[in-house]
């Protein structure tokens, strides 16, 4: 007779069993042959902490507030003006990129307002079909009178003579960009390793970002495609200067930030691949060259050149115990690292339970050694990609995801993974609230950004720098889409320990990479699993010794607190009477911000905010609220 599985019933046989350290899962099978049914009662092994239940309150699910250009239409005319010619574009990603690199900017949809600035970026295109006819004459007069106009995709409107080319040809078959280092805007590119970047796929042309070729360029060619055709050009017109970009920077930023790149990344991790950084730095340099009093927000705390973060994934039954020697060395070295700890209280296909009383004790020991305690999910499921979102009511100990095979998990939700792991870690590590997250296997579905915001996280380190196409932090958008932001920031992983060769054998290359990333003011996040105490601890010691002279070193939380405060800073400049006024508004307090300028000047006031100036970089003390710095040559 054919028998059917009626149901799989998870049952706790008794509290002693639930809290025991034994292995396996016990099942009681009762066959009712006359009814043609097979009833299965099955008890998963679950560890429960006596008296621990929660979170007590439900999560308020974060909802999308679409970004509006008006949200960024503030500030003075010293800022880079972004004249938005179409909202149907990747302008939100462009906002994230400009904030990441530290360019003060203002967005407007009004050409007269835009052309009131000294340097104007027209985005996403210049087209005779879509722009008001009077705007073309206004652009001509603007450049002829000494303004700087940066055109993205100069498609029409009779502006060829202004931008200095004969014709334009659209294409999607371009995969590489070569940037010349012989021009003022690119003079340091060779030393910074920015002369060749990959912008598209050689095999899947359909997935490539759109590009344009500028034929018969009259001025200088700053960047060429792999076949030698002009991609980014600059030309004089009257008393001013123009730049024509054939690469849509916003589109490329969106591909990297939102995990939408296809075959652009030629390595998963452990390589210096500054695709987005090269283009953002080029735009920054154009702004610096053409804005007389340009001031850039530095990207590294305390006047250092590299932001260095050690992080550890703790996701194996011996990993908590083995994490202690790593933390002890970090304490001796005087730095704080981040430990992403899996709260594994269900035994399943992946591993046995290790978030038990011993696990809680080791977690507290790590915190006592100075570690940041962060979440690495509950189940460490590879198929988190397929989990439903959840409803924000998931609680311990009722939330019991069960990994059945390498690629299949039941009873899990994204919100459950985030809420419950945070709750348990907050319960054990009580010095600081858990605010950082990394998923197992870097399994990172599109709903994670809003889930993180819903569950109370602030920071994510859930993707590699190579996949993101950048060595700079960035803000996550809702659903990894194009409409608006979440309050969560991403700090991509630079070096990890699983790809061959062994980590210690990559130490010298990693040192070189750290110096390269330092040359662009980037972030260097190291991921080390603590499943064993081996050559990876030697790597940790070696890389710390290397970067200490020039790097800020700390945890995800420490850097995230600084970065999110820096992201909120507003900067304007006014000049007159031989003086330069820098107006800063810091809604969130921060210390160690650097203002990057062309030269050091005498500080008239205040005399207690500027700590030092070296090569035009002003290191500031504590900022909170409104500040004014007055300088004189």
Image (cartoon, rainbow, N blue to C red):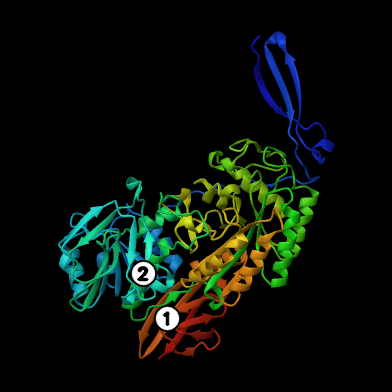
Name the secondary structure under disc 1.
loop
Residue 267 placement (x, y as % from top left): 47, 54
Name the secondary structure under disc 2.
helix
How many C-alpha atoms fall within 10 Å of the one at disc 2: few (<14), some, or many (≥20)?
some
Q: Is residue 572 left or right of residue 427?
A: left
Quadrant (top left, top right, bottom left, bottom right) of the N terminus: top right
In this rendered view, identify the residue nearer to me: 123 or 37: 37
In this rendered view, identify the residue nearer to me: 124 or 467: 467
| Residue 533 appears anywhere in the view | yes
Going from N to C along the chain, the mark reached first, 1 or 2, is 2
In the rendered view, tell whether residue 24 sits above or below residue 174: above
The disc placed on residue 456 is none
How many C-alpha atoms fall within 10 Å of the one at disc 1: few (<14), some, or many (≥20)?
many
The disc placed on residue 282 is 2
| Residue 244 appears anywhere in the view | no
Residue 246 placement (x, y as % from top left): 27, 60
In this rendered view, identify the residue nearer to me: 383 or 290: 383
Alpha carbon distance from label 1 to label 2? 16 Å
- Mark nearest the camera among 1 and 2 is 2
**Which residue in the structure is indicated by mark 1?**
597
Q: Is residue 311 left or right of residue 25?
A: left
Q: How many marks?
A: 2
The residue at the point 59 percent across, 49 percent down is: 439
* Figure quadrant of residue 311: bottom right
Residue 548 placement (x, y as % from top left): 61, 74
The residue at the point 37 percent across, 64 percent down is: 196
Quadrant (top left, top right, bottom left, bottom right) of the C terminus: bottom left
- Asked if the residue under mark 2 is in contact with the one under mark 1, i.e. CB atoms within 8 Å, the reply is no
Residue 402 placement (x, y as % from top left): 66, 37
């Amino acid at each position: 007779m054919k028998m059917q599985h009626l149901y799989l019933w998870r049952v706790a046989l008794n509290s002693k069993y639930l809290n025991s350290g034994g292995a396996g899962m016990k099942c009681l099978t009762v066959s009712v042959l006359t009814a043609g049914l097979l009833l299965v009662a099955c008890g998963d092994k679950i560890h429960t902490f006596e008296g621990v239940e929660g979170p007590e309150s439900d999560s308020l699910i974060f909802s999308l507030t679409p970004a509006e250009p008006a949200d960024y239409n503030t500030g003075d005319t010293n800022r880079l003006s972004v004249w938005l010619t179409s909202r149907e574009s990747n302008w939100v990603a462009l906002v994230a990129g400009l904030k990441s690199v530290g360019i003060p900017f203002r967005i407007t949809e009004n050409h007269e307002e835009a052309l009131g600035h000294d340097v104007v970026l027209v985005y996403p295109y210049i087209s005779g079909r879509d722009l008001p006819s009077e705007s073309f004459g206004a652009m001509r007069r603007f450049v002829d009178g000494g303004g700087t106009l940066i055109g993205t995709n100069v498609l029409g409107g009779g502006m060829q003579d202004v931008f200095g080319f004969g014709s334009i040809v659209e294409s999607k078959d371009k995969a590489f960009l070569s940037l010349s280092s012989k021009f003022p805007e690119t003079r340091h590119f060779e030393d910074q390793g920015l002369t060749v970047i990959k912008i598209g796929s050689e095999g899947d042309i359909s997935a490539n970002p759109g590009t344009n070729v500028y034929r018969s360029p009259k001025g200088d060619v700053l960047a060429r495609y792999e076949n030698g055709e002009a991609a980014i050009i600059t030309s004089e017109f009257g008393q001013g200067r123009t730049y024509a970009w054939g690469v849509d920077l916003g589109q490329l930023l969106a591909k990297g930030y939102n995990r939408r790149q296809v075959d652009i990344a030629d390595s998963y991790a452990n390589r210096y691949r500054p695709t987005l950084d090269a283009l953002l730095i080029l735009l920054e340099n154009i702004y610096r060259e053409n804005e007389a009093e340009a001031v850039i927000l530095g990207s590294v705390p305390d006047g250092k050149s590299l932001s260095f973060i050690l992080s550890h994934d703790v996701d194996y039954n011996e990993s908590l115990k083995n994490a202690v020697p790593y933390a002890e060395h970090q304490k001796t070295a005087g730095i704080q690292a981040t430990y992403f700890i899996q709260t594994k209280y269900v035994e399943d296909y992946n591993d046995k339970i290790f978030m038990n009383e011993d696990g809680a004790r080791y977690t507290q020991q790590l915190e006592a050694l100075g570690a940041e305690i962060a979440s690495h999910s509950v189940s460490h499921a590879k198929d988190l990609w397929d989990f439903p979102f959840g409803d924000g009511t998931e609680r311990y100990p009722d939330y019991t995801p069960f990994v059945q095979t390498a690629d299949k998990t039941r009873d899990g939700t994204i919100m459950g993974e985030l809420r419950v792991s945070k709750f348990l870690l907050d319960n054990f590590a009580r010095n600081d609230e858990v605010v950082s997250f990394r998923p197992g296997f870097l399994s990172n579905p599109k709903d994670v950004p809003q889930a993180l915001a819903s569950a109370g996280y602030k920071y994510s380190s859930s993707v590699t720098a190579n996949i993101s196409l950048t060595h700079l932090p960035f803000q996550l958008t809702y659903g990894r889409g194009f409409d608006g932001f979440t309050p969560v920031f991403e700090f991509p992983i630079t070096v990890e320990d699983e790809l061959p060769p062994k980590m210690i054998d990559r130490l010298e290359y990693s040192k070189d990479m750290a110096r390269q990333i330092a040359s662009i003011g980037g972030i260097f996040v190291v991921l080390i699993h603590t499943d064993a105490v081996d050559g990876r601890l030697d790597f940790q010691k070696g890389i710390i010794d290397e970067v200490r002279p020039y790097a800020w070193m700390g945890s995800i939380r420490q850097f995230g607190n600084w970065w999110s405060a820096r992201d909120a800073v507003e900067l304007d400049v006014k000049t007159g009477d031989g003086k330069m006024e820098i107006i800063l508004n810091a809604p969130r307090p921060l210390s160690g911000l650097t203002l990057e300028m062309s030269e050091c000047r005498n500080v008239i006031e205040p005399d207690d905010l500027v700590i030092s100036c070296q090569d035009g970089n002003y290191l500031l003390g504590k900022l909170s609220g409104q500040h004014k710095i007055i300088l004189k040559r």
